[in-house]
Amino acid sequence: MNTGISLLSSLLPDDADAALVISNENRRYFTGFVSSLGYLLVTKKEAYLLVDFRYGEAAQKKARNCQVITFKKLSDELTKLIRDHSLKAVMLEGSAFTLNEASAIETVLTKAGAKAVKTSELDKIISRLRITKTANEVEKIRKAQLITENAFSDTLKLIKEGVSERDLALELEYKMRKAGADGVSFDLITITGKKTSMPHGVPGDETVHNGDFITFDIGALYDGYHSDMTRTVVLGKADEAMKRVYHTVWKAQMNGLAAVKDGVTCGEVDFAARSYIDQAGYQGYFGHSTGHGVGLEIHEAPSVSPDSDVILRSGMVITVEPGIYIPNQYGVRIEDMVVVTKDGCINLATLPKELIEL
Ligand SMILES: [Mn+2]
């Protein structure tokens, strides 16, 4: 068993003797094997990955730190494992099972003599393992970020009057995939003009106009790991009010970054960014959290939100992304992704933040 799986085994509470992991990201995290379906049963001593015929051969070759069982009927194999190991209580991932799946699995467990533990406890244990990244994981995130930055810099050259939001998103995705990305981290946000006041606006047929802000909230997926970056640029010249908003967000973002280090709470980082925006007179125009963890999922623990008492630790990867959004006018957001260190953080984003006027 590898450190991940043996850690999970060692963290199982006294009143549970196994965990059944079914979410794609968590199975990948523990076994390194990618599939759209599978069941990882981790007892206090062993780990078994149960997959169907489609994945049997590949899993035998690629899955690490577990024994692979190819099942014809899941319930038969699961029943056998439960009886062979005399398992009495199996924890399920509360956030990964649908109601139907949970009741089907519970029926199998009950018949085999084990209880299904349907709480969020297993999710919390796994989240605590995934929240700090290994050097290997950070390198994958860094590569995803590099692909994102190159695609962004190349796409900026295409911006002119009349280019549509949809075209910008497509160009970015094409360039990312050409450069080796598995895909995009999320539906890319490439929005212009008044739509920039909507933090998660959806790119459409609207075209870029002179004097407009253009917000890019983008990221690539590389070997399962995500990147996340936001930059706001202007076509032509920004007026004084636009510049003031931009520079307020930039300073708030720098304050947030400066607050990041091992031992600080997420709430303190949020406050560092948010209080600057409030004091600059934009109270109420920054309505989302300052950031979030990034890894095998685009949004994962920790949440960098107001009043969060979660303590940052070295090796966590988080975003710092304050914004100001003025309805019916425009919005600005600037986002970097950083690795927390003992004394501060390492910024995985390398692009400058001076306002770009194209
Ligand atoms: Mn983000």
Image (tube, helix red, strand yellow):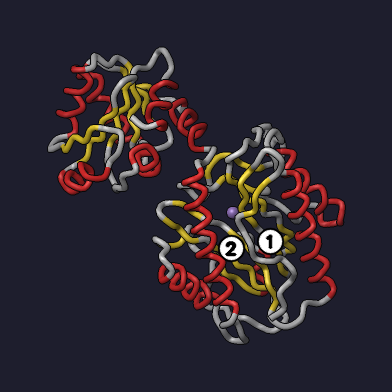
Residue bearing mark 2 = 217
Towards the viewer: 168 or 183: 183
Residue drawn at point x = 52 percent, y = 48 percent: 138
Relative depth, front residue between 247 and 177: 177
Q: In which quarter of the image is the N terminus?
A: top left
Residue 335 point in image, percent of width and height:
65, 57
Name the residue at 70% across, 44% down: 344
Circles 2, 1 touching at the beta carbon (< 8 Å): yes
The answer to whether the beta carbon of the residue marked 1 is less than 8 Å from any atom of ligand 1 is: no
Q: Earlier in the sequence, mark 2 or mark 1?
A: 2
Q: What residue did someone put label 1 on?
A: 333
Residue 211, located in which quarter of the rendered image?
bottom right
Crowd tier of the residue under label 1, counting other residues whose Cα lies within 10 Å: few below 14, some 14–19, many 20 or above: many
**For the residue labelled by badge 2, is the local secondary structure a helix, a strand or a loop?**
strand
* Residue sitting nearer the eye, 177 or 283: 177
Residue at disc 1, secondary structure: strand
Q: Taking 164 as reference, is 237 left or right?
A: right
Q: Name the residue at the left extreme.
A: 72
Q: Position of residue 260 (x, y in %)?
A: 71, 43
Residue 132 vertical position relative to residue 41 in the rendered view, above or below: below
Q: Does residue 311 appear left or right of residue 284 in this picture?
A: left
Residue 107 place in picture, x, y as percent: 24, 25
Q: Image quarter for residue 106?
A: top left
**Residue 326: image location, x then y, percent:** 74, 63
Question: Residue visible at 50% across and 65% down?
Answer: 147
Badge count: 2
- Ligand 1 neighbours mark 2 (CB distance < 8 Å): yes
Q: Which amino acid does label 2 sit on?
A: Asp
